[in-house]
Image (spheres, rainbow, N blue to C red):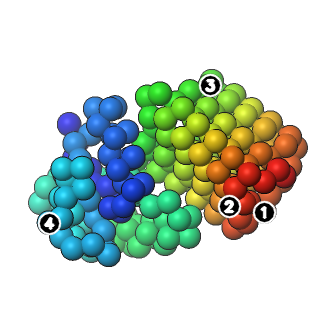
Amino acid sequence: MKKIVIIGASGHAKVIIDIIEKRNEYQVIGLIDSYKKANQKIMGYPILGKENLIPELMIKQGVIGGVIAVGDNWSRSKLRDKIKALTPKFKFLPAIHPNSILYNNIKIKQGVVIMAGAIVNAATKIGKHCIINSNAVVEHDCVLGDFVHVSPNATITGNVTIGEGTHIGAGAVVIPNIKIGKWATIGAGAVI
């Protein structure tokens, strides 16, 4: 199996690890985190060090890429930029839970995370490094910009466009044909 790292070592990383283990396509060699000490373990995997260690891991251990496991949209975008600058050959991989439902004719870009119970319906486009969290629904013909986070149990109805970096709070509902701009925050339980 190809070797990968998980970037981030908090609660979101635990869910990503579970997805990777369930899919059984990659071998996680450890986690990368700038705010936690090396050699601590998260779900049995060691924290290896900070992002500047990634080029060495690629050369010496054959790491091909990984998944950014950071829920905050702005932080996730900055981490992506930092890693791309350190090593342009790093592959940002998707983490798609086997118990999610993905319909035909959808487009998913690099680094996307889709959690258990999430549904992504037909003709939807999901940008880079988006998170479709547990039991979230993204209906037909939606367009999500890069770094969008759709929180647990949120519902995005048909033909909705969501701009880059926007966070849709837990349980929020976005009715059909709405356009939401970039870097917006929709509160938990809101109806838009």
What numbered label is drawn on residue 103? 3
The span from disc 2 to disc 3 (Cα, nearest Å) is 23 Å
At mark 1, the secondary structure is loop
Which numbered disc covers residue 166? 2
Q: Residue at x 45, y 65 (%)?
A: 80
Left or right: 100, with 42 as reference point: right
* Residue 1 appears in the picture as rendered: yes
Residue 94 horizontal/vertical position (percent) = 44, 44
Q: Earlier in the sequence, mark 1 or mark 4?
A: 4
Where in the figure is residue 18, as x and y percent of width and height? 34, 41
Q: Can you tell which of label 4 and label 2 is closer to the viewer?
A: 4
Q: Position of residue 81 (x, y in %)?
A: 46, 70
Image mark for residue 126: none
Amino acid type at image mark 2? Thr
Q: Is residue 141 above or below residue 186?
A: above
**Which comes sooner in the sequence, label 4 or label 3?**
4
Q: Are marks 1 and 2 in contact (CB under 8 Å)?
A: yes
Q: Of tags 4 and 3, which is closer to the observer? A: 4
In front here: 58 or 187? 187
CA distance separating discs 4 and 3: 40 Å
Residue identifier under label 4: 39
Amino acid type assigned to the residue bearing label 4 in the image: Asn
Frontmost residue, 168 versus 188: 188
* Residue, disc 1: 181
The residue drawn where x is 63% and y is 33% is 120
Q: Is residue 143 left or right of residue 100?
A: right
**Outermost residue, front side:** 189
Which residue is more in the foreground, 66 or 116?
116
Is disc 2 placed on a helix, strand or loop? loop
Sequence-first tag of 3 and 1: 3
